[in-house]
Image (spheres, rainbow, N blue to C red):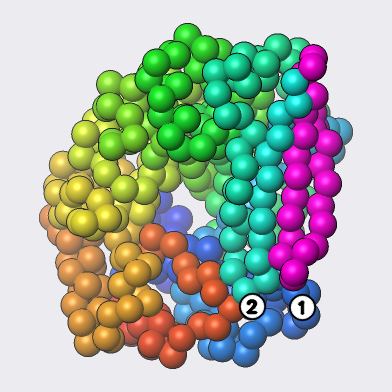
Amino acid sequence: MNRRERLLATLRGNPVDRPPVSFYEINGLDENSQDPAPFNIFSDLSWKPLIDLARDRSDRIVMRSVVFRDVLPDPIDELAHIETSVCDGSLFSIKKIKVGKRILTGRTRRDPDVNTVWTVEHLLKDVGDLKAFLEIPPREFEGKPDPSPILETEAALGDTGVVMIDTPDPLCLAASLFGMAEYTVIAMTEPMLFHQLLDRFAAILHPKTEAISEVLPGRLWRIYGPEYASPPYLPPRLFFDYVVRYDQPMVEAIHRHGGFARIHSHGNLKDILNDIVSIDSDGLDPIEPPPQGDVELRYVREKYGRGLVLFGNLEISDIENLPTNKFAKKVEQALEEGTAGTGRGFVLMPSACPYGRKLPELTMKNYEKIIELVEGFQY
């Protein structure tokens, strides 16, 4: 079967010739080795073999956000004044929102040799900032999704993979406004205020998810943000209050139009797995092995694999640091545990991807070992 057929069969719980393998963010389509822009790490020649490997031999899952024709879908940025500047080669962005006499300020930094954006100052610092933010008049959802970027990406992929629609949940948008320490304290001590903030974002995300699902039915989705309410950040009882209550309507909207909802949650899972299943999600990633997580892949497969497609469970630090002969044992273990017994399906996948400009030779060898072992795997 071709790569697209393999992925779709896995999502539906149908038999496949072998487990699919995804390199997560690395897909061989979005990495432009010809772009000389200073913040494009993929222009370095060390990346070319991995880009080619992802394009030619991985089961490609390409993440896309959906744009809207009439309005910007981000409920924060359209309220903000944003300035960008370059200093000592790094790109800085300052976001300011004026509320009465208070000015809320957030800052980010991006360095040319690291493919990530660092938040150096969060927009909300305390309960006073949260109360001020909640004074901003809520906006109503409007606008029509533009499906053309998704359809164009699917055409470019052909039979080599699928598009995955990528969306935050209300908790992700709310929690990321704060530093982690401030977020956890406010989420535990000011639940009424925090629910008001979640409701503010849900009023946008819920109808937005419905509108996109209707225009683009039958697609795979990734919902990210639930990990903000996982232990040890918050007690498990708050996972239901802050995730299930708000993510279930998104999953229901996706299902109404034949789509598949994959929940993304790093770190500890054992105490929240029942709640994740209660949302009626179709998949879970990245199921990190101990010590990064707190459950073995085999346990998740045995207890929850009948309803969930499992995506994982290779740790990016192992790809980057383990000698290839030792890393191969990690891959073999993931393949064995991810396919053990009966279950809906398994996709071999790292928890993240390298983000430095120079891709080490060892890292490349370990990616090649992933492909070698999954292509030779037999049920």
- Taking the spot 75% from the left edge, 39% from the top edge, the residue there is 95
The 10 Å Cα crowd at callout 2, few under 14, some 14 to 19, many 20 or more, is many
- Residue 331 seen in render: yes
Residue 378 falls left or right of residue 193: left
Where does the magenta region start and end? 77-101
On-image quarter of the N terminus:
bottom left
Residue 79 is covered by the magenta coloring: yes
- Badge 1 density bin: few <14, some 14–19, many ≥20, Cα 10 Å: few
User: Which secondary structure type mostly characterizes the magenta part of the structure?
Assistant: strand
The reply to whether dot 2 and dot 1 touch (C-beta < 8 Å) is yes
Looking at the image, which residue is at 45% across and 14% down?
190
* Residue 126 x %, y %: 55, 24
What residue did someone put label 1 on?
35
Name the image quarter holding residue 105. Answer: top right
* Residue 309 visible in the picture: no
Where does the image place residue 146, in percent across and percent down from the top left?
78, 42
User: Which residue shows up at 75% across the image and 82% down it?
Assistant: 34
Question: Is residue 190 rendered magenta in the image?
Answer: no
Task: Tell me: 266 left or right of 293.
Answer: right
Question: Left or right: where does residue 290 sit relative to residue 224?
Answer: left
Mark earlier in primary sequence (2, 1): 1
User: Which quarter of the rendered picture does the C terminus lie within?
Assistant: bottom left
Q: Which residue is mark 2?
A: 42
Q: Position of residue 312 (x, y in %)?
A: 33, 59
Residue closest to the eye, 144 or 154: 144
Q: CA distance from mark 2 to mark 1?
A: 8 Å
Instruction: Indicate the secondary structure of the residue bearing disc 1.
Output: loop
